[in-house]
Structure formats: structure tokens, C-alpha cells
Amino acid sequence: MDKINVLIVEDEALLRSAVKKYVEREGFSALEAEDGEMAIEIFESADVDFVLLDIMIPKIDGWSVMRRIRQSSNVPVIMMTARGEEYDKLFGFELGVDDYVVKPFSPKELMARMKAVLKRSSASRDTKSSSLKIGSLEIDIDSNEVLLDGVELRLTPKEYDLLAFLCQHGDMVFSREQLLNKVWGYDFFGDLRTVDTHIKQLREKLGDNKTFIKTVWGKGYKFKAGE
């Protein structure tokens, strides 16, 4: 199996060097970028499997780099930042961030989170069925492609994971706590509102079919097509 290539985007040289050391110690290959322009150039020219991305970087900020990445790729991304406000976290998840680490952090914690994200990404690909079709909605598990009435929906990785999970368990009601654990993982230290944010975004993208995702008051959410 080829080594996983990790792109480390961090303008602080000492921190970047420390993270690189731990990444390589785990058996991964490391690519380095000290600003947003360099990050985009490397991402678009090299084979990148994972991104560790700082927000406050020179030239092009991390949010813009994240948007650029999601235009063409679903690679896992962990944000590294000194800003820990809830708004920043929710905004990052809306852009498709997989996890979030607030500085100062332990490199060991970062590596644990990275391996957990990789494990979840691998598990989402290992599924019994290669496709799901419910009503006018079709999900191709192999390509992570979602079609609604034959038109592709552009979803972030977590929106896709959440929609696929709900479709695979149609008519089953899941609380926000259960969805946070099942879709984000038991090791994800997120807020319950993360689930609500992603449900809202999915409904917006489903348009007239937003009623596929039902709110069961006092209990949670479920997927129900055809009503």
C-alpha cells in the first residue's frame, strides 16, 4: 500500500516542523506549505491524501484554501487554529472540514484525531451496497455521487455521510447524539448543533425534496421519501 501523503499548511515554521516529525513517525509522507498560495499550488500538482490546514495563514487564508480544495476533492481535512469560537467551528464544518484542533494542541492528539478521521473515511467507503436508490434520490457509494432527479448534488463530505447514513436506515429515528456518534464518530468532540447545521444545509440542497428528511419532535431525525 502506498504511503498517505499529508499536506501540512502552517506558517509557523517550528510548529510545522513538529507536526511533520509526528506525521512521518506515523509512517505517512509529509508535504509542507507556509502560505495559502503554496498550499493550493501543492494540492493541485501533487497527490495529496490528507490536509492539516491552519486558518490564519499569509496570502490566501485557510477558509479560501478549504473552498478551493472542496471544489475538486473530498480528501479529509483537519483545521488547525488558535481561534476556538463556535462560529469558526460551525463555519468550518459548513465548508467541509472533517475535524478541528485548537492551538495549542498536543501533536499526539492531532495524530490521534487524524487516524480517527482516516478510519471513518475508510469505513464510509466499505459498505455492503455500491448504490442506494430511494424515490428520486440515488447515491453511488463508490464515487460518493448523489443524484436527485438525475441532477448531481454538490455535497460536502459530511453532508454526504449524513445523507447516506439516513438513507441506509430509512424510517429509523436517530437523535442528534446518535447521529453525532454514528456519522462523526465517538471520538468527535462536537456540539449537537453541528448536526442541526448539516441537516439544514442538506434540506436546502434537496430543495423541493427537503421533506425527505423528517424532524420527529422530541426525538430526532429520520429519512422518509415518497410523501
Image: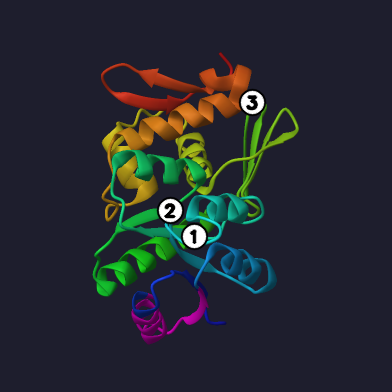
Q: Mark 1 falls on what kind of element?
A: loop
Report the amino acid beneath label 1. Answer: Pro
Q: Position of residue 204 (x, y in %)?
A: 55, 25
When the figure is inspected, residue 35 is found, relative to residue 146, above or below; the finding is: below
Circle 2 is placed at which residue position? 98
Q: Which residues are magenta?
A: 16-33
Q: Within the magenta stretch, is there residue 22?
A: yes
Report the amino acid beneath label 3. Answer: Gly
Q: Residue at x 38, y 40 (%)?
A: 90
Q: Mark 3 falls on what kind of element?
A: loop
Circle on res. 121: none
Q: Within the magenta stretch, is there residue 1?
A: no
When the figure is inspected, residue 176 is found, relative to residue 61, above or below; the finding is: above
Task: State which tag comes first along the sequence, 2 or 3.
Answer: 2
Circle on res. 76: 1
Q: Mark 2 falls on what kind of element?
A: loop
Tag 2 near tag 1, CB within 8 Å: yes
Drawn side of residue 83 relative to residue 138, left or right: left
Circle 3 is placed at which residue position? 135
- Locate the N terminus and report the quarter of the image it occupies: bottom right
